[in-house]
């Protein structure tokens, strides 16, 4: 199955916490690019991960040529043309940077957006930047829209501080761009609140088509009322099968399996390229998974998992 995201990486601070080093990644068949990436490191404000660290919010790099991207030649050979970096903080301290790499291709339909509230109007969100692939008309419409708290998927994520997952957005009245999404072939939307300080708020949105989903499966996990277990609040799957029932009826204990490690440490996790002893077969299903924490004021509010 083709997915919109071609490469996913996690970059983490070194022991001195002055540079970012390779943590883990999912590269599929792009082994040469993986080799070029594993020995990289980034100082504060250097390269795509370092720029996101310095900015303190998600950033989009739509063109690698003649940019600060450090792996341009390897990316060109791999067919990668765009990068999005998502820094994960606990307070002012960086925990990790998650990088998504995509490539322009007429067969791929999707978008990743970064929404930000306007410094002149704290109650309105607009698209700060985004990657839309070949969907130029949808990009034009998106950049003209302003959303208030609770309005649209970015606005709901902003208001609640929780991730939002919607299917069939072409028919969803809460999605302001539903008719334009339908025309572009976009069917599924995921909104993730990233930074929510007193002055500046950011929301990342992932928009995908059925033919090229962001991931094979997306799930939202939240702590139960007692804070003892994680439960699956919602899930989306490109293919309906028994695995959905397994996931959405199980619970996760802190520290157990990939999701449990995210809850224990606050660090994003990639599983699927680990030793067999690292797997929890029920939770990880021997699949390639990225799990991202949603942290507010030092506490975990939710985990978003992507299965590729």
Image (tube, rainbow, N blue to C red):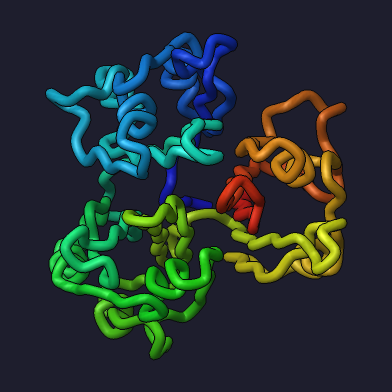
Direction from residue 117 to residue 215 in the image, left or right: right
Instruction: Give the residue at x 23% y 65%.
Output: 126
The front one of 109 and 12 is 12
Q: Position of residue 226 (x, y in %)?
A: 85, 64
Residue 202: tell me if it is visible. yes
Q: Which residue: 33% across, 54% down?
A: 200
Q: Nearer the viewer, residue 94 or 72?
A: 94
- Taking the spot 42% from the left edge, 21% from the top edge, the residue there is 33
Q: Position of 232 compared to 189: left or right?
A: right
- Horizontal and vertical percent position of residue 108: 34, 55
Question: Residue, x 57% and y 23% (percent of image)?
Answer: 23
Number of marks present in the image shown = 0
Q: Residue furthest front?
A: 198
Quick check: can you spot residue 7? no
Location of residue 184 by image quarter: bottom left
Quadrant in which residue 138 is drawn: bottom left
Q: Position of residue 260 (x, y in %)?
A: 79, 44
Q: Is residue 290 above or below residue 240?
A: above
Q: Is residue 52 above or below residue 171?
A: above
Location of residue 235 (image quadrant)? bottom right
**Is residue 78 shown left or right of residue 276?**
left
Residue 21 pos. (x, y %): 50, 16
Q: Is residue 273 above or below residue 268?
A: above
Q: Is residue 112 above or below residue 68?
A: below
């Amino acid at each position: 199955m083709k997915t919109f995201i071609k490469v996913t990486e996690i970059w983490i601070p070194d022991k001195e916490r002055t540079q970012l080093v390779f943590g883990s990644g999912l590269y599929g068949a792009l082994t040469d690019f993986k080799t070029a990436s594993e020995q990289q490191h980034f100082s504060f404000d250097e390269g795509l991960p370092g720029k996101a660290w310095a900015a303190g919010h998600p950033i989009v790099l739509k063109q690698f040529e003649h940019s600060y991207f450090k792996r341009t030649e390897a990316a060109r050979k791999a067919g990668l043309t765009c990068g999005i970096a998502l820094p994960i903080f606990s307070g002012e301290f960086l925990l990790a940077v998650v990088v998504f790499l995509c490539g322009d291709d007429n067969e791929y339909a999707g978008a990743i957006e970064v929404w930000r509230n306007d410094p002149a109007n704290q109650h309105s969100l607009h698209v700060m930047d985004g990657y839309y692939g070949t969907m130029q008309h949808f990009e034009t419409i998106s950049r003209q829209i302003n959303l208030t708290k609770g309005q649209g998927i970015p606005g709901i994520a902003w208001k609640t501080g929780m991730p939002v997952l919607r299917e069939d957005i072409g028919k969803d009245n809460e999605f302001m761009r539903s008719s334009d999404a339908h025309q572009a072939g976009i069917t599924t939307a995921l909104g993730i609140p990233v930074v929510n300080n007193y002055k500046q708020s950011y929301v990342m949105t992932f928009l995908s088509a059925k033919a090229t989903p962001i991931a094979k499966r997306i799930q939202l996990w939240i702590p139960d009322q007692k804070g003892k277990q994680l439960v699956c609040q919602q899930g989306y799957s490109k293919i309906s099968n028994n695995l959905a029932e397994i996931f959405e009826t199980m619970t996760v204990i802190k520290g157990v399996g990939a999701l449990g490690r995210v809850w224990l440490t606050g660090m994003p996790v990639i599983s699927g390229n680990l030793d067999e002893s690292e797997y929890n077969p029920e939770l990880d299903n021997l699949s390639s998974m990225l799990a991202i924490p949603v942290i507010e004021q030092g506490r975990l509010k939710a985990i978003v998992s992507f299965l590729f």
